[in-house]
Image (cartoon, rainbow, N blue to C red):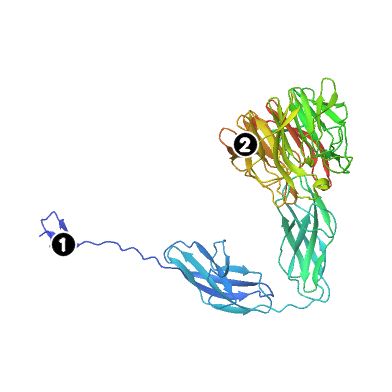
Amino acid sequence: MIHLFKNSVIVILLFGTAIYLSSCKKEETPLTPPVVATINVSDITSSAALIEGTVVNDGSSEITDIGICWSTSPNPTISSSKTTIVSGSNPFTGSITGLTADTKYYARAYATNSAGTSYGNEVTFTTNNITKATTIPTLTTADITSITSTTAVSGGTITDDGGGDIISRGVYWNRTPGSDIYPDEVTSDGIGTGSFVSSLSDLSPGTTYYVKAYAVNSAGIGFGPIISFTTSFEQNSVSWLKKTDFPGGARYSVAGFAIGSKVYVGIGYNDGDWPVRDFWEWDQETNTWTKKADYPGNSTGLVVCFSIGTKGYIGTGNDFKSNGFTNEFWEFDPETDNWTQKASLPTTPARAFAVGFSIGTKGYIGIGDMDPFTDGNLLDYYQDFWEWDQETNIWTKKADFPGNTRTGAVGFSIGNKGYIGTGSTGTYNSRDFWEWDQTTNKWTKKADFPGDTRTWAIGFSIGNKGYIGTGYSDSRNLRDFWEWNQGTNEWTEKANFGGIARSSSIAFSIGNKAYIGTGFSGGTIYATQDFWEYDPSLN
């Protein structure tokens, strides 16, 4: 009986009658690939076309990808060229671009679900032949509108196609003026005559840009007039606070250090690229600047600077007398307002763009450019690392920096450890970050700097945290800012620097605050003289 009623259900009615009902199990609809059709080809030009498709059946599963695939050979697949549709509409239309003129193409609509990918019927079309132009296009550049701190809108109007098809158009933009500028960025905004709109993005706040429209036909490329604009600047009023401007005028590649509650800034290059030798003191309590004794050494900029106790130090850098480099090393005493020359760094040739910091009563200088006037090679860099003893005025060579030779790196210290990172090898910018232990004279690689690779950035420390920010990368100045935790070996992005993007600035800390000022910006604001306070507790 058990076997007999295995696939049956016995229902006992109140009247004592037994009825046998066959059991049933709902069958699931099997999943199948979608059914898709290619409907139409339209708007064919010499380089583009529109293809329409539709999903006839989704195969009882969610469609995860739809679009158009194409090739110059029959039966194109998604491994060929394809365009994906993201609108979710059905029927759908895909624009295929970048085609070759007077060429036959094969296209199919496609759709994908969990069961696989299906293709619609194949359609063919031939792109139009290009009408040969007799002259390059004539056009205008549209006024810049919708300007924000990082975006803007421009475009152009083609007033004469030169007698041929316009096969490309858009705008160039750069931070450098001049009609022959090589663009930092370029947009591609379709084909044909008439007006077009171009969106500019990823701009730097408070920065001047130069824009010109372009159009291409078979005779060449034509440009509209150059129009300049400056992106807006939004100050982060929480963690960054603007202080009194540096009174010595705009400049870059300056020297600076902090002693007690005072900051000392001077030398460098003004906005005419001329070396300057003045030196100034800033009082943290009163937010006022006072002129001090001019720097008497030969260094003009690209120097190493740090403080030990109540004295400040400047060393190496450009030599204004020889146009080469110098290894001079000078001590400043703010109590007497006097400079005293100390023992020069004992290396040949001299150097610039080195890094430096202090730990206790010792100062450290390492890596940097070799003097090309002595060395004869513009791309020779040091890898060495030196210790200076304040008490004995003697230099001692320490373990070489284990990273690649480089220039324009960042250096700072935390406790009895020193840190070097970023910089340029001459071929590429670096993001590696290294720790040197004063006790063991050993280097240890730490977590790479996660921001854009860069050179001529700034660095400093507050407590057990190190900071790197601003700098120069891929033909643009930066204003991002990063914090490194010595305890966890982790980097965290912080609020962008409060001023405009720049490189070759100066930075130092007093207690739980940091200060950044001057620097090279380029554009209409070539060099800067603003001075900012950073409070990490508010970020």
The spot of residue 501 in percent (x, y) is 75, 43
Q: Amino acid at mark 1?
A: Tyr
Q: Nearer the viewer, residue 167 or 157?
A: 167
Report which residue position mark 2 lands on: 435
Left or right: 508, with 267 as reference point: left
Report which residue position mark 1 lands on: 20
Residue at the image position 74 percent from the left and 34 percent from the top: 507
Left or right: 485, with 293 as reference point: left
The spot of residue 508 in percent (x, y) is 73, 31
Is residue 158 positioned above or below 376 on the image?
A: below
- The mark that comes first in sequence, 1 or 2, is 1
Q: Nearer the viewer, residue 523 or 331?
A: 331
Is residue 368 positioned above or below 281 on the image?
A: below
Q: Amino acid at mark 2?
A: Glu
Answer few, some or many: residues within 10 Å of disc 2's Cα (few below 14, many 20 plus, some between 14 and 19): many
The spot of residue 451 in percent (x, y) is 65, 45
Nearer to us: label 1 or label 2: 2
* Identity of the residue furthest to the top in this view: 335
Secondary structure type for disc 2:
strand
Report which quarter residue 303 is drawn in. top right
The mark found on residue 332 in the picture is: none
